[in-house]
Every structure is written in C-alpha cells, then in structure tokens.
Image (tube, rainbow, N blue to C red):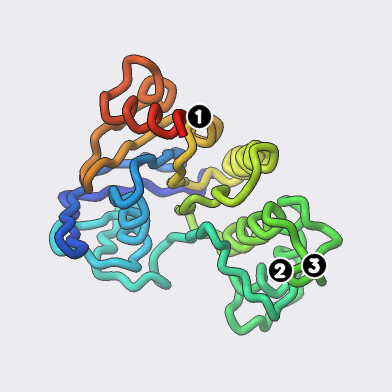
C-alpha cells in the first residue's frame, strides 16, 4: 500500500519583511515534485509552511484530508531533511537515526531492528558506531534519509539536500531517493537549485519566482527551450556562471 498523502496549499499567504508570498499548489499522493527558483523566491518558505515551521497569514494547508494549518510541526505527517542534515555530533549514526523512531532513544528490540534495516537500505550498514564527523557529506545525508525512513511519515520534504555534494555523489543520492520512493511511496517535495537534480529526481517541477508559482508542469518541459521565460532566464543565468 502506498504511504504517501496528497498535499494542498489553498491561497496560502505569508509575509517576510516586505516580501509577500502567495501559494496555491496541489501535490498528489506519492508524487515527487522538484521546487526550483532564484534565491529568496520562497522555496524554503513553502516547505516550512507545509512542515509547520512557519504560520501562514491566510489560506489553509491540507495533508491528506486533514487541515493542518494550525497543527504543530511534531503532529504533522511530515519529515524534513535539511541541507545541513541536522545530525547531532555527539551521537553515533545509530542513535542519530533512532531519534526518528523514539526521541528518548528507548527502543524496543523491534525498533532497533527497524533502525538497523533503515541504515542497511541507505548503504550505511557497518557504520552504526561512527560519529557524524567521521562520515563523508554523502554519508551524512544518507543518515538523515535513514532517520526520515524510520519516522514513517507519508510526506518527505527535502531542502537542497545535495547542495554540498559533488556531481558524482549527487547522482548517487538522487538514485537512492528514487529507489526509496519506489519502496515506500512517500510524497516527496525537494527544493533544488540544480536542473540536473530536478531532472533526475522528479517528473514534475514547480518554479517559484518572487513568492509566486511561475511555472508548474513536467520537469522536462519546464526546463526545455519552450519552458516559461522565468525558468529559461534562471537556468541560463546558472549555466553562464
């Protein structure tokens, strides 16, 4: 059975200083969507609104059939992976992942098995006793992904998870996320600045510009020559750097 739930933003408004944002978006259950756009356009804000780290000034956020607009982050059916992966330096890999199952780290034998299995699935078997500082950047992101797996939430939000990785590792991580999506059926929204990552990860792309959705459709189409002008300008500027 598919784990994913649909996500809907209905007229969701948010103001950051003088920047005003407004989002209307529907994401299907188990869909994978890439979110792109210039820095400061509202990509991370959109994820934070869905996760509950920001509160909209208007509109509503619905996950599944539940209005979660006023629901605290811990009670939403959402996991989030940040660029810096949010691992605790003083805990080993096993404990960092186990936090996703039980924040007090009091695990049953079954839960310990779940953590071990999640580490195996992301390619970290045998590295349970290492600290985050002993891992490569790609391995730290794998640990963050394992923690999201053991949380068993139907919606996974990823905020530029591969930004600090080289091209080879980015491709490897994109393949891993794709494999895990096929296994779990989670609904995934991933913020990225990379057209290559968007193409590798997501059949659908949403382009945000100045706090509004300026493009929404098949990733291949939006990134092609016939895509919206805002997308073409953004991709051209990135490639000319």
Per the image, label 1 sits on a secondary structure element best described as helix
Residue 12: percent from left, percent from top:
19, 54
Name the element at disc 3: loop
Of label 3 and label 1, which has the lower sequence position?
3
Q: Which residue sits at x=18%, y=50%? A: 22
Asked if residue 236 shows in the view, the reply is: yes
* Residue 26 falls in image quadrant: top left
**Would you say 1 lies left or right of 124 here?**
left
CA gap, disc 3 and disc 1: 32 Å
**Disc 2 designates what residue?**
132
Q: Earlier in the sequence, mark 2 or mark 1?
A: 2
Disc 3 vs disc 1: which is toward the camera? 1
Q: Mark 3 points at which residue?
A: 128
Mark number displayed over residue 199:
1
| Residue 218 on image: x %, y % | 39, 25
Distance Cα–Cα, label 3 vs label 2? 10 Å
Q: Classify residue 12 as left or right of residue 110.
A: left
């Amino acid at each position: 059975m598919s784990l994913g739930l649909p996500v809907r933003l209905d007229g969701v408004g948010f103001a950051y200083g003088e920047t005003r944002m407004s989002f209307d978006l529907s994401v299907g259950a188990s869909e994978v969507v890439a979110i792109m756009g210039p820095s400061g356009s509202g990509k991370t804000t959109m994820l934070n609104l869905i996760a509950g780290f920001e509160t909209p000034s208007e509109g509503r956020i619905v996950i599944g059939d539940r209005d979660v607009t006023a629901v605290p982050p811990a009670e939403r059916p959402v996991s989030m992976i940040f660029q810096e992966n949010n691992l605790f330096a003083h805990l080993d890999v096993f404990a960092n992942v186990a936090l996703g199952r039980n924040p007090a780290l009091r695990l049953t034998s079954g839960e310990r098995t779940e953590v071990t299995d999640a580490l195996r699935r992301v390619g970290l078997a045998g590295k349970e006793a290492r600290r985050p500082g002993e891992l490569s950047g790609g391995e730290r992101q794998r640990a963050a992904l394992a923690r999201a797996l053991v949380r068993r939430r139907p919606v996974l939000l990823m905020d530029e998870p591969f930004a600090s990785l080289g091209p080879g590792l980015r491709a490897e991580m994109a393949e891993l996320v794709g494999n895990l999506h096929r296994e779990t059926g989670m609904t995934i929204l991933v913020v990225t600045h990379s057209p290559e990552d968007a193409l590798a990860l997501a059949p659908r792309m949403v382009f945000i510009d100045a706090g509004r959705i300026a493009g929404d459709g098949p990733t291949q189409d939006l990134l092609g020559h016939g895509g919206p002008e805002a997308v073409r300008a953004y991709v051209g500027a990135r490639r000319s750097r």
